[in-house]
């Protein structure tokens, strides 16, 4: 997926003007937000979050040790572990595996890392058919390979009627509008692909170092079909996903489904440890794990290392007032919402993502719901600081901040200036007591009116109140 984050403002404007999209995005608050709140009532969320945060930090602080442990234990159980410095390297490795095993068809589960890798396009270029089997990803694939707009619910931006039209046009069958009928139709279309694929490609929610296992979580069961039926299984995931022990995994699984979809537990959970062994009735003949760096090690030891704790639950975007209005496509890359506004600049470069650190109200809702306690709003503020330090913000903005800083560092001058400013703004408000045009604040008044101040500063009002009380 190409980085198009520089188009955030234009895409956000289009999203806000799309009434159908606005209606579809309401599902975030009516489904995911409310379901999460209900599911969290059954556990001590603050305590569980603190425990998971500590366990994730333990893994990241000694990431090299746990990756080596994972590689050793996985290899002992017959899995081949490969490392990729870039996403392009990762796609090349998967392509080489497909070529080595003479693969003609690949079936995939939802994997955001494979989106980073542009894996479907790479496989297609070498003549290998790649079929998405997650229902949401499948819908997007047959809709001209549209990118996902959400990391958990990739097709949340579409409604049932749109999907019904797409199924009828693509499958050549009568148009169905009942969800059970539509999902059955999708299963009937996908089942032959499950039976005939040579290779299955999955992501990996977590890697377990002590057992060399890959943990997969889904709600549709397609991960089982992708790992049991084909003769080759390849799991692609980021290096930060490693957990030292199965006990760490148990803690993570108390929070991942609750945070992601509001479920106490996911419908399907797989712990995959090596290829088919002697006496096993199913499983792949060959298993590979491709561990992707893709910019992740650049965060270790720095101001943004905390972002590597992310377990990709999507809770931050579900609760974000900006994401709830503009949707995922506005962000222009694989990871949308608050977490994407930190990850995308970190992985692809701050100069390519100038608007993303600004695409937040800094309300802190993302911090409150994050299951691993990532202070996302603080990280966004740090990215804004970096933009200013590197001169990446517009001159007018930097000049305005410099002027404000000049006055703010001189309290007497600041008090005089604000005293004059509130009186001018009071007059500008006129009889309506609101300002519809503000020369230095047109970004605000272009879409809303600003209430006019009362004509006195806070200091003046406070002093008057103290005087009255005295």
Image: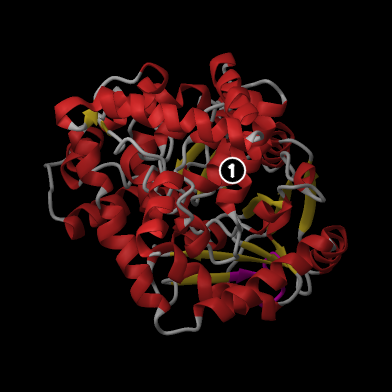
> Would residue 200 be seen by someone viewing this image from the given angle?
no
Q: How is the image coloured?
A: secondary structure
Q: Is residue 187 visible?
A: yes
Task: Quadrant for residue 114, please give it.
Answer: top right
Q: Is residue 208 above or below residue 355?
A: below
Name which residue lies at 60% across and 65% down: 372
Residue 393, horizontal then vertical, whole percent: 60, 22
Pointer 1 local density, CA inside 10 Å: few below 14, some 14–19, many at least 20? many
User: Where 301 falls versus 272 (above or below)?
Assistant: above
In the rendered image, the vertical position of residue 184 relative to residue 434, given as above or below: below
Would residue 121 appear left or right of 26 to someone viewing this image?
right
- Residue 168 at x, y = what percent? 18, 38
Check disc 1 and report the residue beneath it: 380
User: Which quadrant, please, contains the C terminus?
Assistant: bottom left
Give the residues drawn in magenta, as a range: 271-280
Front residue of 415/19: it is: 415
């Amino acid at each position: 997926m190409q980085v198009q984050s520089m188009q955030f403002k234009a895409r956000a404007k289009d999203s806000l003007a799309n009434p159908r999209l606005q209606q579809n995005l309401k599902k975030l608050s009516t489904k995911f937000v409310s379901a999460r709140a209900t599911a969290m009532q059954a556990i001590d969320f603050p305590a569980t979050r603190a425990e998971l945060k500590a366990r994730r930090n333990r893994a990241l602080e000694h990431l090299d040790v746990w990756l080596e442990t994972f590689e050793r234990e996985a290899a002992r159980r017959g899995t081949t572990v490969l490392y990729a410095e870039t996403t392009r390297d990762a796609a090349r490795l998967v392509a080489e595996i497909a070529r080595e095993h003479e693969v003609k068809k690949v079936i995939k589960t939802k994997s955001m890392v494979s989106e980073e890798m542009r894996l479907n396009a790479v496989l297609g270029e070498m003549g290998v058919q790649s079929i998405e089997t997650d229902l949401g990803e499948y819908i997007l694939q047959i809709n001209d390979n549209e990118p996902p707009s959400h990391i958990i619910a990739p097709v949340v931006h579409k409604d049932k009627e749109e999907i019904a039209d797409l199924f009828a046009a693509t499958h050549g069958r009568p148009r169905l509008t009942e969800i059970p009928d539509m999902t059955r139709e999708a299963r009937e279309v996908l089942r032959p692909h499950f039976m005939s694929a040579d290779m299955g490609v999955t992501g990996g929610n977590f890697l377990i170092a002590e057992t060399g296992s890959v943990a997969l979580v889904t709600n549709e069961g397609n991960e089982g079909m992708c790992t049991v039926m084909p003769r080759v299984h390849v799991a692609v995931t980021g290096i930060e996903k490693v957990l030292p022990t199965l006990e760490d995994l148990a803690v993570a699984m108390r929070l991942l489904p609750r945070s992601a979809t509001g479920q106490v537990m996911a419908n399907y959970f797989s712990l995959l440890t090596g290829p088919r062994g002697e006496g096993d009735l199913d499983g792949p003949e060959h298993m590979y794990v491709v561990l992707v760096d893709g910019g992740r090690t650049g965060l270790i030891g720095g101001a943004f290392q905390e972002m590597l704790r992310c377990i990709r639950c999507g809770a931050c975007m579900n609760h974000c007032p900006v994401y709830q209005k503009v949707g995922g496509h506005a962000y222009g890359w694989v990871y949308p919402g608050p977490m994407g506004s930190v990850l995308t600049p970190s992985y692809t470069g701050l100069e390519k993502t100038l608007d993303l650190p600004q695409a937040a109200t800094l309300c802190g809702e993302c911090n409150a719901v994050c299951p691993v306690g990532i202070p996302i709003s603080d990280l966004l503020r740090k990215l804004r600081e970096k933009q200013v330090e590197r001169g990446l913000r517009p001159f007018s903005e930097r000049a305005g901040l410099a002027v404000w800083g000049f006055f703010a560092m001189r309290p007497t001058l600041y008090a005089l200036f604000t005293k004059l400013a509130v009186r001018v703004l009071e007059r500008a408000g006129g009889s309506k007591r609101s300002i519809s045009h503000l020369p230095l604040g047109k970004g605000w008044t272009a879409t809303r009116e600003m209430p006019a101040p009362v004509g006195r500063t806070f200091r003046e009002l406070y002093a008057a109140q103290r005087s009255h009380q005295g």
